[in-house]
Amino acid sequence: MSDHYQTLGVDRSASQDEIKRAYRKLAREMHPDVNPDPKVQDRFKEVTAAYEVLSDPEKRSSYDRGGDGFSGFGGGGFGGFSDIMDAFFGGGGTPRGPRPRMRQGQDALIRATIELQEACFGTTREIGVETAIICEKCGGDGCAAGSSPKTCDICKGRGEIQQVTRSFIGQVMTSRPCGTCQGYGTVIPQPCGECAGDGRVRARRNVTVKIPAGVETGNRMQLAGQGEVGPGGGPAGDLYVEIIVSEHDYLVREGDDLHLSVRVPMTGAVLGTTIEVETLDGEVELEIKSGTQSGTVIPIRGKGMTRLRGGGRGELFAHVEVVIPNKLSKEEESVMRKFAELRGDEKESSQLRKNSEGGFFGKFKEAFRG
Ligand SMILES: [Zn+2]
Ligand SMILES: [Zn+2]
């Protein structure tokens, strides 16, 4: 058995750096791509084996004590050129080798438009999705019936082509993906006629989506594994359904609350009345107290939107708009004049007041406090 120190041409006291430098120099001279002579290659194997032992402090000290230095090495030998280059340049980087044909599919996004009523109470939708599904004909492997992928002849299954080029530090190995197999390491000699070797086809299918009560525009629901099937029949990504709630004819949403305008005839506002209000739950009766002003906000408890989290319902706020008649008959006019006379309204000056109590916002807050 040759002496590892002699093989590398270094002293027994050589530092790790000296050993590395010595090996580097020899490897440049003896690399098979540079010097294919079998004798040189045998020596290169020795040099590499020596380096493998001496570059590892543990193996080196075992070797120094008289062992072979290969304890724990498993006898697998020192393999390919890339291993050597890793030893050189500290390994790291991305693992080499062919890339897998089967890969994870992408997520998909679709939009579903629903009515406010459906958003409040929840609904179920069948939605047509145009997506990549696994190719039934080949089951995803992309091969025509009875055929299978073959190891690429050009890169011998490595998925990459290696080249030694000259650079300022000497011979440097570079690699690039194999153009013949696109880096897969295998080629499909007879691609499936249905998917042309991709393992998936585009298809339209229907997805049943259960939309929970309380959703609003912009909410996204995630349907795991319902997205695009990956290349080579890889696992599907997720499907996201984005909700769009269409505008209601007269209900305006504000978070979990709803607002609507109700028109009350002047006489009803003055004398008090009951009106019918259309809500998401159907018609409800709303009491208008006598003396109700325009802009008054009346809360209707629990008739707002369902809360997406925590359940329960928001409120519905009825904003009162008192309707003043703009065309009066002779008789109506005379009654109104009589009324004004009784009230003494003709003498009262119209005085501007600070908007401290009335106004939309003040009344709104009042209503909120209940
Ligand atoms: Zn196919
Ligand atoms: Zn190849």
Image (tube, rainbow, N blue to C red):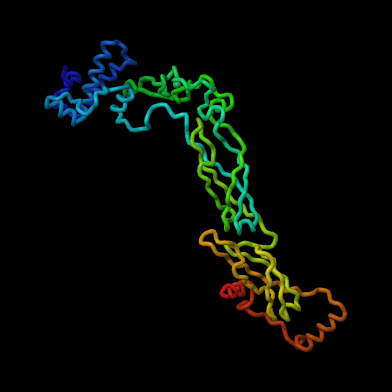
Most distant residue in the front direction? 146
Residue at 11% of width from left, 27% of height from top?
65
The image quarter in which residue 347 lies: bottom right
* Viewer-side residue, 155 vs 148: 148
Q: Is residue 363 positioned above or below 156 on the image? A: below
| Quadrant of picture, ligand 2 | top left
Residue 370 found in image quarter: bottom right
Give the quadrant of the N terminus. top left
Residue 94 drawn above or below residue 316: above
Outermost right residue: 330
335 is higher (above) or lower (below) than 53 = below
Name the spot of residue 52 as percent of width and height, x first: 23, 25
Where, by quadrant of the figure, is residue 137 drawn?
top right
Residue 100 pos. (x, y %)? 44, 29
- Counting the numbered discs, the total is 0
Q: Residue at x 59, y 34 (%)?
A: 202
Q: Is residue 61 left or right of residue 239?
A: left
What percent of the width, then of the height, locates residue 272? 71, 79
For this rendering, which residue is in front, 80 or 100?
100
The residue at 56%/25% (across/down) is 196
Residue found at x 56% / y 30%:
136
Does 240 sit left or right of 98 as displayed? right
Between 319 and 316, the one lying in front of the other is: 316
